[in-house]
Amino acid sequence: MPQQSKDPATLDTQAELRLAESQIATILAIAADAIISLNEQMRIMVFNDGASAMFGYTKDEIIGQPLELLIPERFRATHHGHVASFANSPVASRRMGERQEIFARRKDGSEFPAEASIAKQEIGGRRIFMVVLRDVTERKRAQAVLARANSDLERRVAERTRELEAEIRRREEAQAALIQAQRMEAFGQLTGGVAHDFNNLLTIVTGNLELLSDATENDGSRKLLKRATDAADMGAALTKRLLTFARRRRLSPEILDLNELVLGLMEILKRSIGEPITLTTMLAGNLWQTQVDPSEVENAILNLAINARDAMPNGGELIVETRNVVDDALPFDGGGSEFVLLSVSDTGEGMPPEVLERAFEPFFSTKEPGRGTGLGLSTVYGFAVQSGGHAVMRSELGKGTTVSLYLPRAGAAAATETAQPAETVPLSEQNEVVLVVEDNAEVRELTLQRVEGLGYVALEAESGPAAIRILESGEHVDLVLSDIVMAGGMSGYDVARWIGANAPSVTVVLTTGYAAEEARHDPMASGATPVLRKPYKRAELATTLRDALCNGRG
Ligand SMILES: Nc1ncnc2c1ncn2[C@@H]1O[C@H](COP(=O)(O)OP(=O)(O)OP(=O)(O)O)[C@@H](O)[C@H]1O
Ligand SMILES: [Mg+2]
């Protein structure tokens, strides 16, 4: 048989074709993606190993079957539409599942998310479709986990930022409150000292005026003396306010319902703020009782209302509010304390920061001379702090001001003491002997005169040791009237203690211009020894001496 020589060109083409076929077969075999081809009727012609692994069909099962089998039922209808539109479109290939999620269906009916590329080709008038499909379950899961972690992180960062901001704010407030408290403390000490000296002077002035008035028959002179006494009384009222601020004023706390107190004040409030201002109350039901000096609370509310009125020359709203507060976030409080909040708000002009900062200071006023003493808010502040509470002020220019008093919730039981001087002046009954112990010569002189004026026999000592010398000398003494703070190394308390130990039959009455020093020095005398507050009236002196002597005897 003659060697049939083949056309070398044909030989090459066949070899290349085989090569190409084997390459394609290998690619189909090793590809992890599913590679599927479809005929014009959308029946499956090629189904590689990757597709078998992905869908769970063997080649035998699936070849010749409609593509439909690989598509979840709920998408089949729309899928038809997509295929038709792709078949008729001029583009040769298209990617699916990138922008819009697509799903494929396994033999067992389960679904998985997929991405696919689809291409069409026409060979010899027949159209075929090729699909490469990738299972993106893992990627989607990783993305979801990442997204969740991200949003979790964002949430936690936001949360922590908020916490830190709150903490910073709390610290700033606490710091500001501390600075404010220290300033007020310094002012308090200063003012308290001045007021104390003033009290002594006023005691002398008032007392001498009284003596003069008793001694004169002349009506004209009496009128002048009356005027002088009135002025001295005003001075005394002023020092009282100063002592409240300096927290050295004797308070008479009572257990009371602030709501009742506020309601009782409404008439006066309305009258003092005038027509163009509306007065609103927001009083909490079930308000706790508080323990404060009622007349000081009334003063405070009136002071605040008048400030509010002055801040609202064209009218506005004044709101008095009460509320129970248990607050761990109060800048001045360690946390957990219970307060009854009393706040007075206005819709007035508000304060610029530099005024707000100083408004609690004594004598700070922006009002024209004669209209404001600048003692209103400082008195309110001092009262709140001395009562075991606090005062806080917020103000915004053009919007208004709120002053909040945090007053202590009343404990279980607390004694209330109010010593009212009697109307008529009781005189000495048996010319008892009173030893006046006072280091200030003028005050001593006045006191001696007053004591004698009441029918007692008066002795004097300029210090504690001097008083003790008299007592030791055997001189008869019924009552020792002693100042508390004295030069000479002994306080009134020391004198009282000495008497308690060495001359128990002698009655002791103490006098003072302070309230604070009692708290410091009063371990023994809680209530047992009567204390006269300077400046006192003759009537108060008379009653106190009389009562003390009666009790001493009784
Ligand atoms: N409700 C308020 N609105 C705007 N500013 C206020 C208010 N309350 C107080 N102030 C400012 O604080 C200052 C001090 O007030 P404070 O009550 O201590 O004194 P005053 O009202 O000036 O005088 P006083 O009360 O002794 O008559 C005021 O002069 C005012 O500038
Ligand atoms: Mg005022």
Image (cartoon, rainbow, N blue to C red):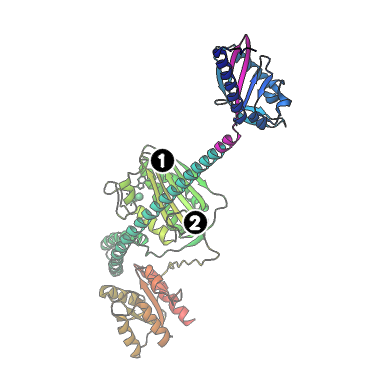
User: Is the residue marked 1 within 8 Å of ligand 1, measured from its CB?
Assistant: no
Badge 1 element: loop
Position above or below: 430 against 402: below
Residue placed at 62% from the left, 9% from the top?
124
Q: Nearer the viewer, residue 35 or 375?
A: 35
Q: Nearer the viewer, residue 111 or 177?
A: 111
Find residue 164 and report its horizontal and vertical position in percent.
Answer: 44, 49
Q: Does the magenta stretch mainly form a helix, a strand or a loop?
A: strand
- Residue 20 appears in which quarter of the rendering? top right
Which of the numbered marks, if any, corresponds to residue 339?
2
Q: Is residue 130 magenta?
A: yes
Q: Nearer the viewer, mark 2 or mark 1?
A: 2
Find residue 483 and report its horizontal and vertical position in percent.
Answer: 34, 75
- Residue 210 appears in which quarter of the rendering? bottom left
Q: Please name the amino acid that badge 1 sits on.
A: Thr
Between the C-alphas of marks 2 and 1, the distance is 25 Å
Q: Is residue 279 magenta?
A: no
Q: Please name the amino acid that badge 2 sits on.
A: Phe
Task: Return the disc, 2 or 1, that comes first in the chain's sequence.
Answer: 2
At label 2, counting other C-alpha atoms closer than 10 Å, the crowd grade (few under 14, some 14-19, many 20 or more) is many
The residue that disc 1 covers is 347
Residue placed at 57% from the left, 52% from the top?
286
At label 1, counting other C-alpha atoms closer than 10 Å, the crowd grade (few under 14, some 14-19, many 20 or more) is many
In the rendered view, does 197 fall on the left or right side of 170? left
Per the rendered image, the range of residues in magenta is: 119-143
Q: Nearer the viewer, residue 120 or 474?
A: 120
